[in-house]
Image (tube, rainbow, N blue to C red):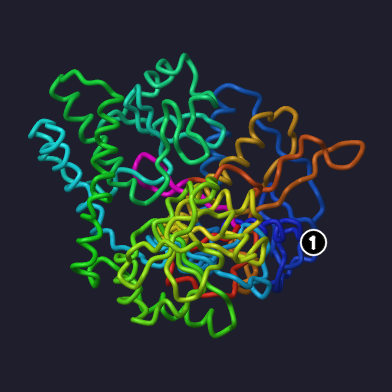
Amino acid sequence: MAGAGLRAAARRWLLCGGHGGPRTASSSPSCPGCGPPGPGAHCPGAPRSAPAQAPAGGADLSAHLWARYQDMRRLVHDLLPPEVCSLLNPAAIYANNEISLRDVEVYGFDYDYTLAQYADALHPEIFSAARDILIEHYKYPEGIRKYDYNPSFAIRGLHYDIQKSLLMKIDAFHYVQLGTAYRGLQPVPDEEVIELYGGTQHIPLYQMSGFYGKGPSIKQFMDIFSLPEMALLSCVVDYFLGHSLEFDQAHLYKDVTDAIRDVHVKGLMYQWIEQDMEKYILRGDETFAVLSRLVAHGKQLFLITNSPFSFVDKGMRHMVGPDWRQLFDVVIVQADKPSFFTDRRKPFRKLDEKGSLQWDRITRLEKGKIYRQGNLFDFLRLTEWRGPRVLYFGDHLYSDLADLMLRHGWRTGAIIPELEREIRIINTEQYMHSLTWQQALTGLLERMQLPAQLPRGLHLLPAPHTAAARGAPLDGPALHRLHEDPLPWRHGPHPLRAPLLFGTGPQPLPPCPPWASTQISNKSGLLPTRASAFSPSLIT
């Protein structure tokens, strides 16, 4: 990431004494390339003088610490060169693991939010339809109709405590992130959250969601379709609380979930998309280009989706053309994922051209044919597509990808539309300055916490001295102000020696709704494949 590159550059400058590139001519023999040293400052090539001692304490110590703080603040303001921003491509494929696409022979795809990217305009439609179902079929109060969908309220990955009506962010260590808990549309104070969980932020494992986001009392929302579900759930809770209406939390949660499910089961969403594909389906021409390129290079393709054949057929005809089935070696619809990956009992059924079920026994999966349901174990037996030569793309980290990677060794790619916005934020100058300042402040705190044990610290050179030493643009603007003294110790550097200014530290998050941001760790470089057709992707 850009921050890591900046830290590496900083280390290089500091280890070189601030002279990693061409030096500016200087008249001072004691400090080549830096010019006349300022009072109380030094460079690695200059004779060392006795270090300035920190004040003993009281008001003088406080003034000293604030002065160092302000000096660091001014330094960080000019620290970033313009080229460190906009380093990341928002439409790229990123890898969490090493992969050679030359070794991948088979490519698999989900349909919804993978091959078919839907516009955000679909979410308000789902929200409104499910809200009306609650009112008309479940007899919920008419006042709920006043609520509209708020696209900025929630993100994927949040947890909902059914018994407490809390929507919140829980980290990988099962700790509730304070400041993220909402009941209805109102934030819950941190003290109340801690009290609700017995004086701790930790949620025991037995209460958490299972592998597919389902648990005894806490549900995790992982797919993109869950965004309007979270919004509707919060709005209904907000109405009941605001009007002091008694309700059973479990009943309310189930009713909202069933209403959202009815939107899909009754085919309402499919109808909206089929009636206006230009409005709801994005990047169809790019999907066709990617699939055609893979086939042209001798790759085998398959499609596994939970959507019905009639809906998939119309969408693929819109994006690819009437002969889209000739691109795929296997097409499976209404697969019933995630059960498709774990349940061995459901057999494959063949569909005719009209989508009607056939009764013949399936002994092989034929190209150009359409199959329904089935299971992964029969799929592997009939195709022999096993191990890392298979790369499957989906949008749900659990039901699409986790089992395939952990149990069957497939390589998997996560389609993450939100990552595009995250990368654009990371590329902004504001984000990079915030990142650099937090890391600088962390380093400064580490240096200042034990002033008695750290007699030598970070020296700041005067601005005129710095200007004379900057040299060429690649000579690290403002970095000549930083020089790290080795602390006295009989066996080399002192063990309390503080890390460099750009050492690893907590990463600030960009401004956003209370749920914070999705953080993606990228181990390797960019893959040489264009990914804009499927939004930013993450390969595991």
The x and y percentages for residue 388 are 67, 62
- Where, by quadrant of the figure, is residue 98 drawn? bottom right
State the residue at coordinates (7%, 34%): 142
Foreground: 202 or 80? 202
Q: Residue furthest toward the right?
A: 491
Q: Is residue 517 left or right of residue 100?
A: left
Q: What residue did someone put label 1 on? A: 30
Over which residues does the magenta segment extend? 509-522
The x and y percentages for residue 33 are 72, 68
| 106 over 452 or under it: above or below | below
- Residue 519 belongs to magenta span: yes
Residue type (three-letter) at the residue carrying disc 1: Ser
**SS for tag 1?**
loop
Magenta stretch prevailing secondary structure: loop
Foreground: 118 or 138? 138
- Where, by quadrant of the figure, is residue 136 drawn? top left
Residue 428 seen in render:
no
Q: Please give the count of numbered marks on the rendered protein.
A: 1
Q: Quadrant of the C terminus?
A: bottom right
The x and y percentages for residue 451 are 69, 30
